[in-house]
Image (cartoon, rainbow, N blue to C red):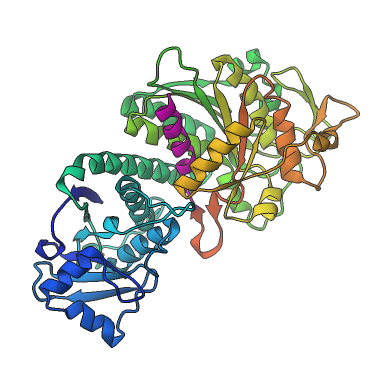
Amino acid sequence: MEFSIKSGKSEKQRNDCVIVGVYESGKLSHSAKSIDDAAEGFLAKVLKRGDMDGKLASTLLLQTVAGTHAERVLLVGLGKQGELNEKGYRKAVIASVNALAKTGANDVASFLAEVDVFNADNKKQDAAWKIAQMVEAVNDALYRFDVMKGKKEKTNKDATKGITKLEIHVAEQDENQAAKVALKQGLALSAGVSFAKDLGNLPPNVCTPTYLAEQALAMVKTHGLTVQVLEREEMKKLGMGSFLGVAQGSAQPPKLIVLQHLQGKKDQKPVVLVGKGITFDTGGISLKPGAEMDEMKYDMCGAASVLGTFKAIAEMDLPLNVVGVIPACENMPDADAIRPGDVLTSMSGQTIEVLNTDAEGRLILCDALTYAEKFEPSAVIDIATLTGACVIALGHHASGLFSNQDRLAKELLAAGEDALDRAWHMPLWEEYQPQLDSNFADIANIGGRAGGSITAACFLSRFTKKYHWAHLDIAGTAWKSGKEKGSTGRPVPLLTQFLKHRAAKA
């Protein structure tokens, strides 16, 4: 998809199609009104006939409208005037793409960035936000993952169908420069989200710990990042007994992937992102049920979100110091695998009684969180498909957010609201900690069924005493099941927005 910024009158555009908005009341957006005037009231007549009601995300495609130069005009419903919110705007944008998907309209001009969009505080979003969101929404709607399909159709009748070029129109010529910056940021975020989706959707026999390391190393040349990959022997020297305990049941070698985006001031303390990279999770000796176990290829979506975020901020040239730490391995049940009852010694020196080998994510993250101390971070955020309990608590709409500092939690919550990638602040109270008591080690790796997502976060909190830390449990948001099965790319939008806020403050 090719995007560009342009300004001009809607009726003067010579594209295959022009997209304009219509409200439920029959009120036309500014650009729709311009077309209606040029067409001597034709759009108003169409609305009066009842062919288009203006309800949110409804569409009507008109051919060869008199007085215009475009071959088609697409009317898109915006709902009630003055009530178009952020999610409604994305729905309208996606509806416009879907409406043209099976048409010959390849070169399209969209005037939807001119409409008023209101945030949760009932304030209007600026043009930059609308442009960036349009780019991301369009790319999200067009995303397909078919690289693993070997059987290709010889002739694809739909190869020339749908949008290939999209002009996003802004009201004034002098807005072009700011709009181009917003376009660049929207494209960068889309690239990061798509990268995270691709990694999540790959099968586990392809997307191994080694493959993740290779993808990170490739970013040295493509994005100018500094990347280091630690091997098993180096991790042994560091004392990462917890991480290596999980990895010892697999023939795939574990990797500790460290990325650095150092575009801030030299004395600026970095933000560290830690991503869980279990490239396949059988549950180990505590074997999972067979049903839907294929979806455990998504247990590395925390790692994918870190890589996707680094791609986004690198393409934005974000002036900030950011470090990524990705512990990557498989959780397999062979003869060398850890057992329930085993005791592991973590890099921090704390010993861990393994009561359930399927609670392995926290076992690899705890060593990565200890390793993060070496960077003297301003904040550490770990991202993990950690607990099924979080899915029960929050469903598939919000990621679970835990933190040892309320100010950091509020920053992340605000970033999630801005990016339409929301999280919900969960408790991390001291009262939950005794559930992790062990008779045989410093800590047990599970705390029972009650408050499972909270006790998992409590476990991680034992390894984050030396810095400000937040944990995002994305078990319910990282992928979709059923007919639309696939990675969502979340929480790349939230993380990228958070880092943009930090860069602006810096």
- Image point (66%, 19%), residue name: 466
* Residue 484: image location, x then y, percent: 49, 61
53 above or below 259? below
- Image point (45%, 46%), residue name: 419
Main structural element of the magenta stretch: helix, strand or loop?
helix
Residue at the farthest bottom position: 49
Magenta stretch in the rendered image = 487-506
- Does any portion of residue 277 appear in the rendered image? no
Q: In which quadrant of the rendered image does the C terminus lie?
A: top left
Please give left or right for residue 263 compared with residue 19 in the image.
right
Please give left or right for residue 103 compared with residue 327 in the image.
left
Residue at the farthest right position: 439
Please identify the quarter of the rendering in which residue 105 is found: bottom left
* Residue 260: image location, x then y, percent: 44, 22
120 above or below 187? below
- Does any portion of residue 62 appear in the rendered image? yes
Question: Residue 374 or 42: which is nearer the viewer?
Answer: 42
189 above or below 1? above
- Image point (70%, 26%), residue name: 242
* Residue 72: image location, x then y, percent: 17, 71
Question: Residue 359 or 11: which is nearer the viewer?
Answer: 11
Give yes or no for residue 217 being in the magenta stretch.
no
Please identify the quarter of the rendering in which residue 401 is found: top right
113 above or below 190? below
